């Protein structure tokens, strides 16, 4: 019998909330929160893909220096998206911000979804392993 096929990226992202768990062992990848919790991805990752997540506490104040530079409108949505995308690209967040700011979408072959999960704003991003476009977006 052939192995089960990977879920399509869009379907996987649509159901992302069901694969995210707080403080559970054996996560594929995770994001540490400032209050000590750890949010992890406990779902599949399609073969040939890499998955990254980032989470922040939705009610947390925006740091003043970042608010001055990027504004506060949907800040945590934009921040978690940027963090997840820079993780996919293997680029430090400070370099990412200099190059792309907070409004990059990731480019060709990159899919992402930002969602509210309890008191958190979370972005899950998927990209292809070795896809050069990820590094240049």
Image (tube, rainbow, N blue to C red):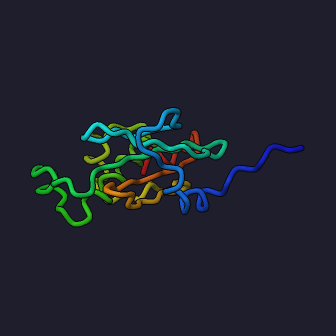
> Looking at the image, which residue is at 25% across and 41% down?
35
> Looking at the image, which residue is at 41% across and 60% down?
114
Q: Position of residue 95 (x, y in %)?
A: 29, 41
> Looking at the image, which residue is at 59% across and 56% down?
12
Q: Position of residue 8 (x, y in %)?
A: 65, 57
Out of 136 and 128, give the one closest to the viewer. Answer: 128
Q: Residue at the right extreme?
A: 1
Out of 37 and 100, give the one closest to the viewer. Answer: 37
Q: Relative to residue 97, is residue 28 depicted above or below? A: above
Along the horizontal axis of the image, is 21 left or right of 49? Answer: left
Along the horizontal axis of the image, is 137 left or right of 64? Answer: right
Q: Residue at the bottom extreme?
A: 73
Q: Position of residue 52 (x, y in %)?
A: 46, 44
> Looking at the image, which residue is at 32% across and 45% down?
96
The quadrant where residue 2 appears: top right
Where's the N terminus, which quadrant?
A: top right
Q: Relative to residue 36, is residue 77 depicted above or below? A: below
């Amino acid at each position: 019998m052939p192995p089960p096929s990977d879920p399509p990226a869009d379907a996987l992202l649509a159901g992302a909330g069901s694969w995210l768990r707080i403080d559970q062992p054996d996560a594929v990848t995770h994001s540490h929160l400032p209050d000590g919790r750890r949010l992890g991805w406990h779902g599949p990752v399609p073969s040939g893909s890499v998955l990254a997540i980032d989470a922040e506490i939705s009610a947390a104040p925006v740091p003043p220096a970042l608010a001055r530079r990027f504004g506060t409108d949907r800040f945590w949505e934009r921040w978690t998206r940027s963090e997840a995308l820079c993780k996919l690209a293997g680029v430090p967040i400070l370099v990412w911000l200099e190059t792309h700011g907070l409004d990059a979408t990731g480019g060709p072959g990159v899919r992402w979804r930002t969602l509210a999960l309890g008191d958190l704003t979370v972005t899950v991003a998927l990209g292809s392993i070795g896809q050069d476009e990820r590094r240049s977006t």
